[in-house]
Amino acid sequence: MLQLDGLGYRGRTCVVTGGASGMGEATARLLGELGASVHIVDIQPPKIACVAWHPCDLSDFAAVRATAAALSAIAPIDFLFPCAGLPPHIKGPLYCMRVNYIGTRLFVEEMVPALADGAGIALISSDAAMGWQGNLAQCLEMLAIADPDAAYAWAAADPEKRVRDGYTSSKEMLVVWVAQAAVKLGLERRIRLNAIGPCPTRTAFMDEQEKLLPEGFLDKWPYPSLGRIATAEDQAWPLILLNSPLNAAVTGAFLYTDQGFASGVFTGAISGAFMGREA
Ligand SMILES: NC(=O)c1ccc[n+]([C@@H]2O[C@H](COP(=O)([O-])OP(=O)(O)OC[C@H]3O[C@@H](n4cnc5c(N)ncnc54)[C@H](O)[C@@H]3O)[C@@H](O)[C@H]2O)c1
């Protein structure tokens, strides 16, 4: 019989990328409160208590491989939470694709040998990826390129078409990769792989992003479930619930944690008028 303590994290080993800020930080903190041993992988040092900080720049593929190799010392790892990511205007669209998708995928793939059979991986895409099905053919083309340097070169060869703003495309790639890779990971190792798609959430990321938005834009965004912009903790909980062993039937999923935004737009219950256009 399945033995669980709460959500199943007590005494388990977790690795959180992006754990130094925002949703990753909230996830790492809550996992610690649930009794897990938490390791943080981030380019900047964490502000919260954890077992160890593993400095790593996800845009540096050699560093990603070295960090994953170092983390194999704490194998078997029970849960991965790849939360790190950045908006496109910080260092441009190609860099955004490099960190948000290519570096994140490489990190997860390098970590797989150190994961326990039956482990869980829950990462953060975005509701910006809600149009992924319209770009599926191109996503599958990029997905087939396993080597990170080759994937980056493919994107860089036609950035206008293959990268666009860098953010939407990288988050669509995560959704399509999760859907495909989850099947293989499940069949081979009973490892689950899922993603969440947050709406606007108050973090350092959104403080930066907001500088480019029209005045008051985030106040006009519809927030059916919370009635306000989400906090990092509002997003950390679905990530933790999705990755819990209680959720064993769920893999390959893209869960919108967007207060009903995507479903509202898909069905016409939410109009795009607040964005200055009809949905
Ligand atoms: N905030 C939002 O409204 C929103 C909405 C949808 C999706 N997201 C996604 O949520 C995730 C978490 O973002 P957040 O909002 O908590 O932002 P945040 O800026 O608070 O946290 C992002 C973390 O990623 C780390 N990071 C950035 N670049 C890195 C790199 N090259 N290597 C290693 N670590 C790196 C940062 O140091 C930081 O700790 C991101 O993937 C983001 O794309 C955010």
Image: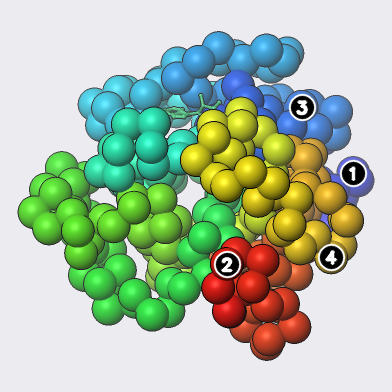
Type of residue at label 4?
Answer: Pro
Q: Residue at x 21, y 70 (%)?
A: 141
Q: Residues within 10 Å of mark 1 (few under 14, many from 20)?
A: few
Q: Which residue is mark 1?
A: 5
- Give the residue pinned by disc 2: 276
User: Is disc 3 placed on a helix, strand or loop?
Assistant: helix
Q: CA distance from mark 3 to mark 4?
A: 27 Å
Q: Element under label 4?
A: loop
N-term-proximal mark, 3 vs 4: 3
Q: Residue at x 55, y 45 (%)?
A: 213
The label nearer to you, 4 versus 2, is: 2
Query: Do the residues under discs 2 and 1 have CB atoms within 8 angstroms?
Result: no
Which amino acid type is shown beneath numbered disc 1? Asp
Residue 112 vertical placement versus 226 (above, below): above
* Quadrant in which the C terminus is drawn: bottom right
To which residue does mark 4 refer? 224
First in sequence: mark 3 vs mark 1 = 1
Residue 122 visible in the current orientation: yes
Q: Which mark is residue 211?
A: none
